[in-house]
Amino acid sequence: MKYLEDMILEHGEVVGEDILKVDSFLNHRMDWQVYNEIAQEFYRLFSDSGVNMLLTIEASGIGIAAVTAQHFKVPAVFAKKAKTSNIGDDLYRAMVHSFTHGSTSDIVVSKKYISAGDRVLIIDDFLANGQAALGLVSIVEQAGAELVGCGIVIEKGFQEGGKKLRDMGIRVESLAIIKSMSEGKIVFA
Ligand code: 5GP
């Protein structure tokens, strides 16, 4: 998506070898126009797939999923990072290791909000090693729901998440795929 690539080139900041900061329009300051363009593109890609709910993970997926939900006219559910290990049996849960924070958390979704028969589109801001997406895929599977695919805003193609998901037969649509970022220079696939 040319518009998004241009925003990344103009405003993105490469931190170290493998972190991209896009705080000025995506992850801290939320630019409604960028969010709307992203949501429209996800709708164009998946509108024929019978999606009846979106699934994302807190915190950075929430804004994107909420705007995208307006285009699909379906609810967006976000997996919560569980605060305690003492959680009831009314929840689906998965373990997710955070690439950016280096910590592992239990993510949970209430069984009330995802069930067999749902057609789920997973939405997230970044795809790196695929841990967040795989945790969400596991929750969809536990619920017996149908996974339509993953809509990712920025995939770092030099990390392994995209390959893992595609090797599992999952449809992954990333609006910008970064091939490399060495020495601060962003190159798209
Ligand atoms: P993964 O689970 O695929 O390894 O990492 C994806 C999650 O980590 C995303 O939900 C995102 O919040 C965060 N993340 C991974 N890489 C980056 C990055 O380069 N920049 C930012 N801002 N977040 C990232």
Image (cartoon, rainbow, N blue to C red):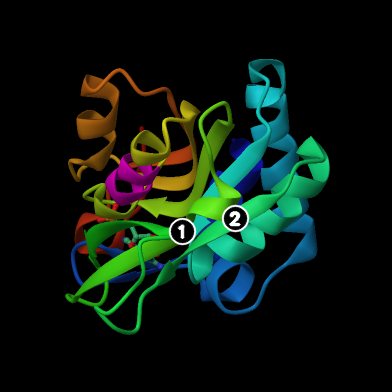
Q: Which quadrant of the figure has residue 45? A: top right
Residues shaded magenta? 133-139
The structure residue drawn at horizontal position 24% and vertical position 52%, both measured from the top left corner, is 131
Q: Quadrant of the C terminus?
A: top left
Side of 45 where 128 appears, left or right: left
Image coordinates of residue 108 in percent, x first then y, are: 39, 63
- Does the CB distance between marks 2 and 1 fall below 8 Å? yes
Furthest residue to the front?
Answer: 89
Which residue is the site of mark 2?
A: 77
Image coordinates of residue 37 in percent, x first then y, are: 74, 45
Image coordinates of residue 88 in percent, x first then y, are: 36, 69
Side of 187 where 16 appears, left or right: left
Image coordinates of residue 117 in percent, x first then y, are: 57, 26
Q: Amino acid at mark 1?
A: Val
The structure residue drawn at horizontal position 27% and vertical position 79%, both measured from the top left corner, is 86
User: Gap in Å between the C-alphas at discs 2 and 1?
Assistant: 8 Å
The label number, if any, that marks residue 11 in the structure image: none
Q: Amino acid at mark 2?
A: Val
Label 1 sits on a secondary structure element that is: strand
Which residue is the site of mark 1?
A: 109
The structure residue drawn at horizontal position 68% and vertical position 71%, both measured from the top left corner, is 30
Mark 1: C-beta under 8 Å from nearest atom of ligand 1? no
The local crowd at label 2, few if under 14, some if 14 to 19, many if 20 or more residues have their Cα within 10 Å, is: many
Q: In front: 127, or 165?
A: 165
Quarter of image, ligand 1: bottom left
